Amino acid sequence: EVQRERAEELLNMYPCGFRPKHSSKLGNDFMLFTNYDPVDRLGGWLKTSYSQL
């Protein structure tokens, strides 16, 4: 969440719905960003503020 606005603004990249599951229960949040809508592979973009697309 911290870098979401910066990724959109500077790189035109958006977070995907993909969320990895860690077997060792890591506490760090992980967010994958792409510049295309990966519907079939990574669950598509998280639809929150992308009405301009």
Image (spheres, helix red, strand yellow):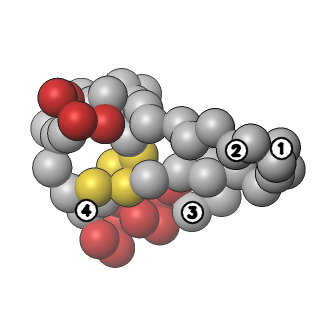
Residue 53 quadrant: top left
Where disc 4 sits, the SS reads loop
Q: Position of residue 40 (x, y in %)?
A: 17, 29
Which residue does the numbered mark 2 point to in the structure image?
22
Q: Amino acid at mark 2?
A: His
User: Going 38% across and 40% down the picture, which residue do you hit?
Assistant: 16
4 and 44: which is toward the camera: 44
User: Going 19% across and 29% down the picture, which residue do you hit?
Assistant: 39
13 to the left or right of 28:
left
Which of pointers 3 and 2 indicates the residue nearer the eye?
A: 2
Which residue does the numbered mark 1 point to in the structure image?
25
Cα distance in 3D space between marks 3 and 4 = 12 Å
Residue 40 visible at all = yes
Which residue does the numbered mark 3 point to in the structure image?
3
Q: Earlier in the sequence, mark 2 or mark 4?
A: 4
21 and 36: which is toward the camera: 21
Q: Are marks 1 and 2 in contact (CB under 8 Å)?
A: yes
Where disc 1 sits, the SS reads loop
Where disc 2 sits, the SS reads loop
Q: Amino acid at mark 3?
A: Gln
Which residue does the numbered mark 4 point to in the structure image?
12
Cα distance in 3D space between marks 1 and 2 = 5 Å
Above or below 28: residue 11: below
Above or below 40: residue 19: below
Q: Amino acid at mark 1?
A: Lys
User: Going 27% across and 31% down the picture, which residue do you hit?
Assistant: 44
24 to the left or right of 10:
right
